[in-house]
Amino acid sequence: MMKAATVERIKSGMRYEFDRSAPPDGFPALPPIPGGRYTDPAFLALEQRHLWQASWLYACHIDEIPEPGHFLLFRRTGSPLLIVHGKDGVVRAFYNTCRHRGAPLVKDTTGRVEGLVCQYHGWTYGLDGRLMNLRDRRDFPGFDPQCYPLTGVSCERLGNWVFVNEDPNARPLAETLGEIPGLWAEIQPDQTRFVHKKSYHVKCNVKVLLDAFLEVYHLKSIHQQTVDRFLDHRGTTITLWPHGHSLMVTPNRRPDWEDPGTLGMIKLATASEITAKHNPSYHLYPNLVTPIADSGIPFILFWPCGPREMEIEVVWCAPDWGGGPLHPLWEKRIANFERILYEDTQFAEFIQESVESAGYRGLNLNYQERRIYHWHEELDRRIGVERVPAHLRVQPVLAPYVVDQIGP
Ligand code: FES
Ligand SMILES: [Fe+2]
């Protein structure tokens, strides 16, 4: 739950931001971020290996695989990952890779099975990944099936949300998220229900679009008729956490105004004043942005599909509405959000064209855009600074501004 002291800290942070006439004393001018970090094939290969294939990533909501035997194929990291709801209720993840010669156990994106049977030569695995049976065992002398389970992948839940991590030495999810799970008690992660999801293909490097969701400097230009009408970016207060995570709270112009688009929807009684009346947007490193509200939680996810292609995925969750049909306003709410999304994506292809041209001289970020810089500093730490070619490194300057928790 968000403590009263934390609420006060955020509110005084918003007041401070409104009143200031310059960045805080001593805040560094952010050095340019090299454009090659968005285009250089060697750098993107490092990013693929040390970031996308070694980070905790949101994979699905438990409502998408609610019963034992339900599975979901997750291919966002370039590896074929199979997420399975086990007979014991535990959700596990494996490579969708038979230990015989690598054929897939499932080919559909989702479905329900009793066991996992390889369609190539019939090796059979339990939902817990154990190899149960193989055809013509006499032709594998001395073979011990116990030594050939499906290769597991770290899989953990944060309430009803399922995350995976291909790093075999991954630290537990909750540990890497710091104070976020505690702050999220107010949105009751084990009670949220899945509402809707949709992906949009965009022709740019994944970071080009992600950057747009880490700042509100652009509200006055591209969201003039939408977000800017109810949020005031001048009061935005930011928390930078360890491991690249961050929070940006933007004040509502009129905190007591209730969005007519959510009138009559179930609202969380446990929501803090910050979540009920303002706009807290969490960023869970590397690719999950979520502007949580008391009436709904959109997970905005950014997935690479190659050097200059990406997908943005929006997953809507909501407080438990107790079964039955969704509130009729949801359709309009999702459509309104989509409109904002199109405002955000409109320049992505053009920016991509620019970053690939000789005319691009790097990103020049201001104080308000420091979450983007924080993102890149963390990327170098994850890759290992010594592996990053010197001309593509970002100079670490934000360490003094990273805190373990918001409140005292
Ligand atoms: S590859 Fe799976 S049984 Fe042969
Ligand atoms: Fe935006």
Image: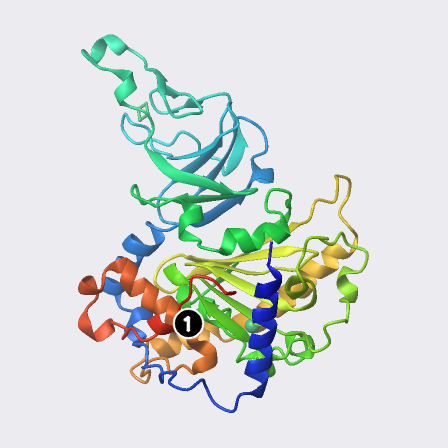
Q: Which residue lies under the disc numbered 1?
A: 372
Q: Is residue 75 visible?
A: no
Residue depicted at 69% across the width and 57% down the height: 294
**Relative to the observer, which residue lies in front, 261 or 249?**
249
| Mark 1 residue CB less than 8 A from any atom of ligand 2 | no
Question: Residue 141 lies in what quarter of the image?
Answer: top left
Q: Indicate the amino acid at tag 1.
A: Ile
Vertical order, 90 against 137 (above or below)? below
Are there few (<14), some (14-19), or many (20+) residues within 10 Å of tag 1? many
Residue depicted at 30% across the width and 70% down the height: 37
Total numbered labels placed on residues in the image: 1
**Relative to the observer, which residue lies in front, 190 or 348?**
190
Vertical order, 307 against 217 (above or below)? above
Vertical order, 98 against 219 (above or below)? above
Ligand 2 shows up in the quarter that is bottom right
Vertical order, 322 against 401 (above or below)? above
